Amino acid sequence: MTVATPFQSLWAKAGFKAETPIQAAVAAPLRNDQDVIGLAPTGSGKTLAFGLPLLEKVTPGDGIQIIILSPSQELAMQTRDVLQPYAQAINVHVTAITGSANVARQKEQLKKHPEVIVATIGRLLELADDGVAKLHNLETMVIDEADELLRDPGLGQVRDLLEHAPGELQLAFFSATDGPILHELHKWFGIEPEVIDVRAIDHTQGAVQHYFLRGGREHQVAWLGRLAHTEGFQALVFFNKNASMERTASILRHQHIKFAVLSRNARAQERKQAMVGFRKGKIKLLLATDLAGRGLDLIRLPAVINFEVPRTATAYIHRAGRTGRMGNPGTVITMGDDHDFRDLKKLVPQYNVQRAYVGNHGLTTERPVSETPPVRKASAAAKTATTGVAATNTRNHGERRTLTAGVTASEPKRRPHKKNRARNRKNKGKPKK
């Protein structure tokens, strides 16, 4: 990808020296108005891969020309923040439209006729249906994290949004994983996009280690607390269900752990504060579900924790992609029992998942002494044959036998037979003959 002249100083200032494989591969097709599917690992620079070539085609002052759809509010805000400096360099305005933000304020922003919109589909469709978002000059629509966004109801919403756009429109789909929907785009959108898949040749991700912590649910929150107190440790913690995430959060609050929750119900400002606090290191654990955590750009994230084994291999890949970005090392930790461990190895056989433990100084692959297998009890004969060892054995209704070095205790006195017990009771107190 040859960076356009207005963008070169910003590119260099960000520390980029060469384009990533996806950036080099999609630039020309996007400039030439081709429909594309771009497949590349997470953290490989997909935002700039589609953002910079498309910004070059924008005409300032002509209204909405590019729409970038994101599956989550965080990703939409993040995409806007990445593109905004480059857009300002060419006098282009980028506006984010997300579901949790104030709709009246968003309507005011749209009156300023921004050229680029980064949005979540639900809110943008609502504004388009109301006639506030005018798409008659739209030239390109990018569906980011397409494998996620095109699931129901997203697929129908994207198609409804296209009803407000011109018939001739460039479509671009980007994802870290392939999926059936990406092979059916001709059916739903009437296009035959060029597939650009660089996953096999992209090596921008750093070394990532995959570990498994075995134990019951009662241990997992305690492990989170111990890891959070490890110096330099931070993690994005994924949950399969909101209920499980909320239960864990309530326990962590009582343990005085510095954490935040990326909840869909939280206000945009609260979610923004959580992200800022996490990036500054003030928050050690960021709790999220797959939807809230999709596409988060945390370049130096030390670890990702799966509080539960992901339901699909795709979910695991996307979660793991949050760490080890841009050449930095990373760690993925999954929690569960023996059954979960077997399921995980079947789910993602491409990863070497090692057993790990939470030690005094954080994560370790060495089994702690407390978890070593118990020593089998020696037999009674072995005990009596051992010199210098004393032991006790309780048997026969609580009577105690003491085994001393080399001496076998006599058997306890047996209880009399039932008939004899009755006779003894009858004769009790009578003088013996």
Image: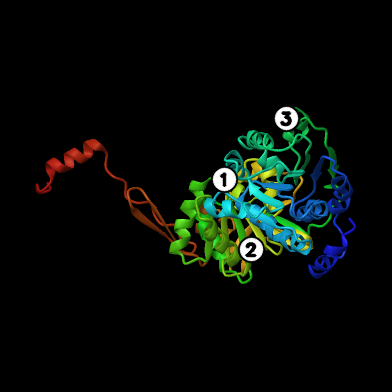
Tell me residue 432's x, y (percent).
12, 48
Residue at the limit of the structure toward the top, as seen here: 187
Tell me residue 333's x, y (percent).
64, 55
Q: Which quarter of the rendered picture does the N terminus lie within?
A: bottom right
Could you tell me how far apart the alpha carbons at marks 2 and 1 are, in whole angstroms? Answer: 23 Å
| Residue type beneath disc 3 | Trp
Circle 2 residue: 363
Helix, strand or loop at mark 2: strand
Disc 1 to disc 3: CB gap under 8 Å: no
| Residue type beneath disc 1 | Asn
Q: Badge 2: how crowded within 10 Å, few (<14), some, or many (20+)?
A: some
Could you tell me how far apart the alpha carbons at marks 2 and 3 are, in whole angstroms? Answer: 47 Å
Residue at 39% x, 56% y: name it: 401
Instruction: Give the image quarter of residue 175.
Output: top right
Tell me residue 418's x, y (percent).
24, 37
Residue at 62% x, 49% y: name it: 72
* Residue 181 in sight from this viewpoint: yes
For marks 2 and 1 on the same chain, the one whose residue lies earlier in the sequence:
1
Helix, strand or loop at mark 1: loop
Horizontal placement of 272 versus 149: left or right? left
Circle 3 residue: 188
Helix, strand or loop at mark 3: helix
Horizontal placement of 248 versus 169: left or right? left
